Amino acid sequence: MNRLVLGITTMVCAAFLLAGCDDDGNAFSLDAYFEEVEGLVEDYEADSNEAFATFNESNDLEELKDAFESMSDSLDSFLDGMNALAPPDEAADAHDEAVEAGEAVLDATEDVNDDVQAAETIDALRQAAGNDELFNLTAEFNATCQPLQDIATENDVDVDLSCPAQ
């Protein structure tokens, strides 16, 4: 359970990595890109915090299933939005690596969600949700944060991306 909580919590921290273009599809400036990232993180956190709390606190099987599915849906929505955006050139490679890693987490989350939804007991649900592959992919996704933070810092963009410790 602790690995699941850590894995899902760190997905929130890493999710900010994937933002940035204007309505015409043109890449934002670095300042605008990172401003957009902060807004997207706030939206994602608002969407997912309730589900995280329920998943961590509830002992009701159906509530737990709904909470895990909600977490998967939140990540899916977030990545859909991110895939529609383009970063500035300075952040393009790091952005693309984050998108790729995020999509791998989403695929694994959706696979785990199938097992979670099929669980007939809370113990079976928690065992399914504690998937090692999902945990490892989430760690890889989180590792894509620091390169973006470094880009911001190197370019005097005042932003704190709250990258998880590695």
Image (tube, helix red, strand yellow):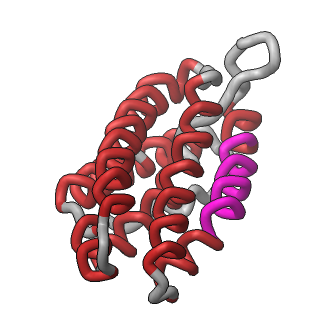
Is residue 27 rendered magenta in the image? no
Q: Quadrant of the N terminus?
A: bottom left
State left or right for residue 22 relative to residue 65: right
Instruction: Residue 77: give x, y in percent of width and height.
Output: 61, 40
Q: Is residue 86 above or below residue 45?
A: above
Residue at the image position 40 percent from the left and 43 percent from the top? 106
Q: Is residue 149 above or below residue 96?
A: below
Residue at the image position 58 percent from the left and 69 percent from the top? 51
Q: Which one is in front, 56 or 165?
A: 56
State left or right for residue 87 relative to residue 158: left
Q: Which one is in front, 140 or 71?
A: 71
Q: Which residues are magenta?
A: 36-49
Is residue 45 rendered magenta in the image? yes
Instruction: Residue 32: give x, y in percent of width and height.
Output: 76, 34
Residue 4 visible in image: yes
Quadrant assignment, res 166: bottom left
Q: Which one is in front, 134 or 26?
A: 134
